[in-house]
Image: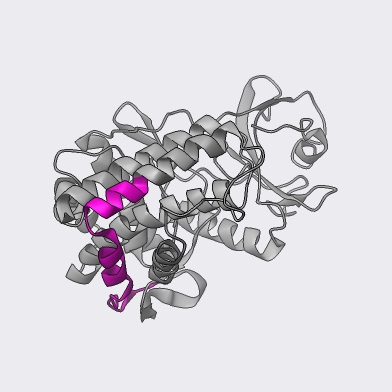
Amino acid sequence: MPTHDPPLAVCRSWFPTGAIRIVPLQGGGFSGSPVWLVEAPDAAGIAAERFVLKGFASGWPLERGLAVHRLVATLREAGIDAVPPQLRLTPPGEGTIVADGDGRLWELSQWRPGAPAAAPSLQQARAALETLARIHVAASGLDGGRENLVGPPPAWGRRVEALHAVLERGWDRPASPGGEWADRSPLQVAVAERQRAAAAILRACGGGSLLARWATITPPAVPLQWVLRDIWQAHVLFHGDNLSAVIDLHSSGIDSPATDLARLLGSGELRGASASAGGGLTVVWQEALAAYAAIRPLSAEEVALADLLHVTGIVGGLEHWFRWVLVENRQFHDPSAVLTRVDFLLKHLDAIARETG
């Protein structure tokens, strides 16, 4: 949740006059980027319309923000209403991004009702995957027709780096650079306990050899294009079984569509058989994946890649959280949300270990 004053001056870039109401929004994510709900009069000055004001990550260059907004515009032009539109500054023609006095970039998008589904129903999963397939089809030609770009997915390189980090640092070793903290925070104590639990899970399935084997895999060359890269259950909103919005596209970039499939399908609670190396994420969700494939056919290589990115992403996700909290001592505005996320990843790690042990 934002801790500074409401950014009234920023809002005036869209609403130069008139009364506006600005309140902080819960669920701003782990990045700490400020998110506000803005209520402003409609064109007739009668009813109040609702918008979401969000700051980009501190230090983001304007070019990066504009690239994300080009993606949003492309998806909207393709008729994908689930992606909320970005509002243009006033006067018209002045763009969709404003910088505040500290240089942070801001955007204003249409507010959408709805809530994430932590354990999506089959109907919800089908709706999400149909929309994701339409997003991938619409984005495939962005920036000069990148549908012809083929190669190893950049996401795999990040997974391999995380696997090597686990092998080198070891989750059994002292978590802090000095071995112990002089004054550990409650979050560090709790995360240290979870790191020890993760180490025990890995030991039970011969984790070192398993991680080393994964790290030597050469992924297939697959189509690369603009994808969302951070589409997980918190960023997909539903009204009942109906999908109302796909939000927060700031992490979008060039990668394989399989990275989005692994991220989205692997972000919900375990469903039926464990979504791990043996059961397979794509096997667990094969009925919902049929809805995706009906719009954008999936190759066997992409299906296998989604499974591999999921299992290695669980390990990499835990390594990132352990390092951020225990080594780098990063601060988070909602420590309870951090522990919920780490516990979720531990549950999936345990499922993977049971399938591979």
Classify residue 184 by image quadrant.
Answer: top right
Q: Which residue lies furthest to the top in this view?
A: 46
Which percent across, then down, holds residue 228?
Answer: 45, 56
- Between 23 and 332, the one nearer to me in the picture: 332
- Name the colouring of the figure: one colour
Which percent across, then down, holds residue 144?
Answer: 49, 77
Would residue 246 be visible to someone looking at this image? no
Which percent across, then down, holds residue 282?
Answer: 19, 54
Would residue 353 be visible to someone looking at this image? yes
Classify residue 245 by image quadrant.
Answer: top left
**Left or right for 190, reference 311:** right
Magenta span contains residue 67? no
- For the point 81% across and 47% down, the residue is 100
- Between 1 and 226, the one nearer to me in the picture: 1
**Left or right for 340, reference 179:** left
Q: Which residue lies furthest to the right in this view?
A: 101
- Between 326 and 110, the one nearer to me in the picture: 326
- For the point 66% across and 28% down, the residue is 24
Classify 250 as above or below 63: above
Classify residue 157 by image quadrant.
Answer: bottom left
The N terminus lies in quadrant: top right
Which percent across, then down, holds residue 86?
Answer: 60, 46
Classify 105 as above or below 117: below
Region in magenta: 198-224
The number of callouts visible is 0
Magenta span contains residue 217? yes
The C terminus lies in quadrant: bottom left
**Left or right for 187, reference 56:** left
- For the point 35% across and 50% down, the residue is 199
